[in-house]
Image (spheres, rainbow, N blue to C red):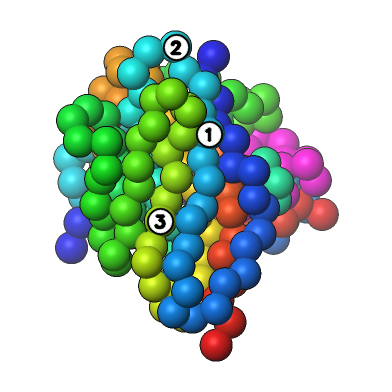
Amino acid sequence: EAQVTQNPRYLITVTGKKLTVTCSQNMNHEYMSWYRQDPGLGLRQIYYSMNVEVTDKGDVPEGYKVSRKEKRNFPLILESPSPNQTSLYFCASAPIQDGNSPLHFGNGTRLTVT
Amino acid sequence: AQSVTQPDIHITVSEGASLELRCNYSYGATPYLFWYVQSPGQGLQLLLKYFSGDTLVQGIKGFEAEFKRSQSSFNLRKPSVHWSDAAEYFCAVGAGTASKLTFGTGTRLQVTL
């Protein structure tokens, strides 16, 4: 089954403790992206990747890192999480983000930072 | 810069009633427009998209949307809502060659029986 898989689904952590949220897709998509969803703000893009070893900042990249060493994986790294990073995170992929390729989303990771 | 406005944060309709969710966009050229639906605990699923051609587009689950360039709108409609349509709906606009999709803030739909 074609899918985007995020892990974990739920994560509670403390301020400053490094964490990684994994994202994997099995559709051989070039484009991958991370979003955070907050009430009243919709989805905001954190980072995206056009292909292996090619990443770029989205609208809200501060406090996050990503890597794209393999085509299928695009982990989101929080080196020193803070409470304002408490949010619902989504990973998404597309064959080529040329404007009309729909995104395929994972089921989300709800992160709480205390 | 592109932007999307969904003026209704929350809408409640009765099952069987018609539905229209509003979406207004700002973009300098012909936009690529999308509607996504997010069911509780799920990721976003594409309902329909528009980038050229017929301005009335049909999507999954009986939804349709109409692109009106003069009004910069891309409203989502459904003639008869089912209880399973209760979800959050997001409108999004994409640029032709960019790698970013700009989402609206979403409209939460509640369906009463």
- Judge whether A71 appears above or below A99 on screen: below
Q: Is residue A33 left or right of residue B62?
A: right
Which three-letter amino acid code belongs to the residue tagged 1?
A: Asn
Mark identifier at residue B61? none
Q: Is B10 included in the stretch rendered in magenta?
A: no
Real-space Cα distance between discs 1 and 2?
13 Å
Residue at the spot x=48%, y=28% of the render? B71
Q: Are marks 1 and 2 in contact (CB under 8 Å)?
A: no
Q: Secondary structure at mark 1?
A: strand
Residue B63 drawn at (x, y percent): 33, 59
Q: Which chain letter goes with mark 1?
A: B
Residue A44 location, quadrant: top right
Mark 3 is surrounded, within 10 Å at the Cα level, by few (under 14), some (14 to 19) or many (20 or more) other residues, namely some
Q: Residue at x 66, y 59 (%)?
A: B10
**Quadrant containing the C terminus of chain B in the rendered view:** bottom right
Comparing A34 with A10, the one in front is A34
Quote the CA–CA distance across marks 1 and 3: 14 Å
Q: Which residue is mark 3?
A: B77
- Type of amino acid at the residue the image marks with label 2: Gly
Label 3 resides on the chain identified as: B
**For mark 2, what is the residue?**
B28
Asked if the stretch drawn in magenta spans residue A82, the answer is: yes
